[in-house]
Amino acid sequence: MKDQHNDLHSFNTRTRIWRKYYLVTYPLQRDQHQVCRVPGKSAVLFGGFSSAKNVLLNDLWVIDYSKANPEKNLDSDVQGADWVKVENDAGPRPGPRRGHCMISSGTTLFLFGGATREKNQSEATVDSNLYILETGCKPWTWSILKTLGVSPSARMLHCMEFYGPTQVFLFGGLSISPAREKSVLSLEEDEEPCKALNDLYMLHLPTVSFSRPFAANFIPPPRYGAAVASDRNEDQPMLLIVGGLNTEYCYIDPFLLKEETISNDTEWKLKLHHLNKEYGETPLKESLRQAKDIIAQNDSRITELEGIYSELLRQE
């Protein structure tokens, strides 16, 4: 098992500078946890897996970085922020877990999935409940959201992100069969996962209902552990999915999900971000063409160097 960390860093997208924070209180080192931003320049951390203690976690932490200024004193760690453990929350807090997804909208956090183990369970399971954490009240309150429609199956290491202000998309992930549930805690990189997924679900928050939108064009192959980012523009929202793993190799290809209207119906297109139809080339053909150009340039340079070397030998 590789080393785990509990340090905190921030990246300034304007100056493109990473800064490390000086903290007095730290959560336990972990991985496969989730952190979400909430109003007031604060962030919330939940769950994960500790390899040092070999346990799943369901601790809840909050950090207030409103007094920290990462643009000052660039030669030292940023001060003015610290973690505080939340212990007086109300409602059914989710059980210890890893590989879950947690996203935020205002003061409300949404948590789905993950490999978990409740206190009364002898084996790990994969959770399919959708949890809500409301941080705008005192105490913070957990609840389980009862949804309508076709709900996603239990999974871990999936993607979940907002698509506009009222829709949430969930994509892919890793399902765990009952035969593998005993070994969820010790899932190593060289172990074969049960099943990578590439199904797509949409949660419509006003009606609290899940559906399976039609996805057209280039659909990403099954994967888990991918990164996702969204543009929550109400007029033209988009989702970007990058990377991930499946049973054979690691992906790095980017996919873009957006909605396009065709007459009275809606067609959902999941396509490669770098695809440009104007050139009439698929990404693979374009890559091969570029590789051939580079090889031809190298051959020309080698021929030139051989001529220079032969001329030097004649002069000697």
Image (spheres, helix red, strand yellow):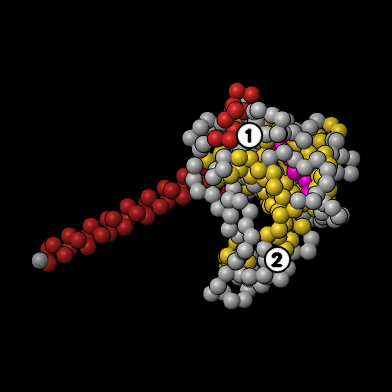
**Over which residues does the magenta segment extend?**
109-114
Q: Quadrant of residue 225?
A: top right
Residue 6 in sight here: yes
Residue placed most toward the observer, 146 or 224: 146
Tell me, for residue 86, which label it has, or none: none
As drawn, which residue projects farthest toward the right? 207
Residue 82 pos. (x, y %): 67, 63
Image vertical order of residue 127 relative to residue 316, above or below:
above
Q: Residue at x 63, y 66 (%)?
A: 12
Q: What's the distance in space between the residues labelled 2 and 1, CA to CA?
A: 34 Å
In the image, taking residue 138 as reference, residue 85 lies left or right, namely left
As drawn, which residue projects farthest toward the top? 179
Residue 163 in sight here: no
Residue 39 pos. (x, y %): 79, 60
Looking at the rendered structure, the number of numbered marks drawn on it comes to 2
Read off the residue under disc 1. 174
Q: Residue at x 55, y 53 (%)?
A: 5
Q: Amino acid at mark 1?
A: Leu
Q: Amino acid at mark 2?
A: Tyr
Q: Residue at x 13, y 62 (%)?
A: 313
Residue 216 pos. (x, y %): 71, 37
Q: Residues within 10 Å of mark 2 (few under 14, many from 20)?
A: some
**Which of pointers 2 and 1 indicates the residue nearer the eye?**
2
Read off the residue under disc 2. 65
Residue placed most toward the observer, 125 or 290: 125
Q: Quadrant of residue 233?
A: bottom right
Q: Residue at x 72, y 50 (%)?
A: 60
